[in-house]
Image (cartoon, rainbow, N blue to C red):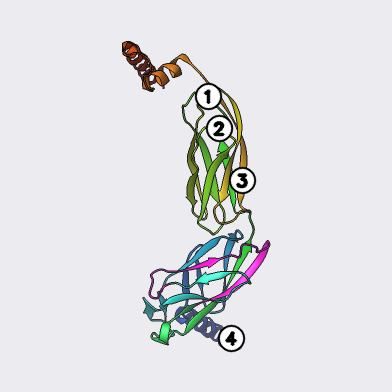
Amino acid sequence: MASGFAKMLLFATVFSLMAFSASATYLTVEGPVSALLYNNGTLNVGKVGPGESFYVLASPATANASGVIVNIGWDRLEAVTLPSGWSAQPSPLYENPMKMKITVGSTTVNGTYTMVLRAVNVGNYSKLGNLTFTAEINVTPDVLSTNVTPVDVVAGVGQPVNLNIAINNTGASDDPFLINVYGLPAWNQPTEVIATHSTSNTYLYPIFENEPGVYTFNLTINSTTSPLIHKTYPITLTVQSSLINDFSATGQGVVLSPIIYEPAYAVMLLISDVYHLIFK
């Protein structure tokens, strides 16, 4: 008899807990990580570099105390407390999904930090009140892994050759990175790329030189928001002159010699084009 009563009590307790969970208001976080939070819950954001910004995205949909789904329940995400030197921009009212921006202080030292955020039902119109939660962030400049290939390059005079820049962004920020070279005499333009959080992509960066020789220079990958986040790779470019390259350059250059040589230039360009069409 006692055993039967204990089973009934256990069943009633489990049923009550399930009913509570089903009816409790919640917040569905969609970025930079996915999570389902209840009041006073904890969100682990991941890694962020000093000076970087990241966004917390969440759905406005939730359930009220009776378990009824409210499609537009939360009206805004905002910060309650932040670490010293940090800043935050609340999400615009009635945005879907809600998207608030948080910027880490540029002088923040490495470590784990917490802040208090909340989802707000403005005017308590849907009788939800506010949902408050804690966000944990690991601040470190080690938020990306990179690779550059090849590091020993052979090219013709004035002929661009592509370097493959692999960037794996392991942090929570969608950080812009600037790819550039230093120590190469020819004009090579810097390129800005956006490496979104938790993604890996390969970008092409062309280099060239207008004179034969061996050139050693550095390729850099720098965060545009934090000078502490950067990578450097030494590259060697060997520029060689060849008959085909010379034909191509002469055929496409500005003719300064007498006009009688124009047919010869045309033939050189034709030979170069045919060669590249067949063998490249």
State the SS at label 1. Answer: loop
Q: Which residue is rendered at x = 39% and y = 71% of the image?
A: 95
Q: Amino acid at mark 3?
A: Lys
Please tell me whether residue 161 is drawn above or below residue 260 in the rendered image.
Answer: below
State the SS at label 4. Answer: helix
> 154 and 2: which one is in front?
154
Say if mark 1 contacts mark 2, CB within 8 Å. Answer: yes
Mark 2, residue position = 185
Q: Earlier in the sequence, mark 2 or mark 4?
A: 4
Q: Amino acid at mark 2?
A: Pro
Q: Which residue is rendered at x = 58% and y = 50% of the image?
A: 144
Q: Which mark is residue 6?
A: 4
Distance between the Cα atoms at labels 4 and 3? Answer: 64 Å
Distance between the Cα atoms at labels 2 and 4? Answer: 84 Å
Q: Which mark is residue 211?
A: 1
Residue 226, by quadrant, is bottom right
Q: Position of residue 133 (x, y in %)?
A: 55, 76
Distance between the Cα atoms at labels 1 and 3? Answer: 28 Å
State the SS at label 2. Answer: loop
Closer to the eye: label 1 or 3:
1
Q: Is residue 105 magenta?
A: yes
Mark 3, residue position = 231
Distance between the Cα atoms at labels 3 and 2? Answer: 21 Å
Closer to the eye: label 4 or 3:
3
Q: Provide the residue span drawn in magenta.
A: 92-118
Q: Amino acid at mark 1?
A: Glu
> 60 and 4: which one is in front?
60
121 on left or right of 147: left
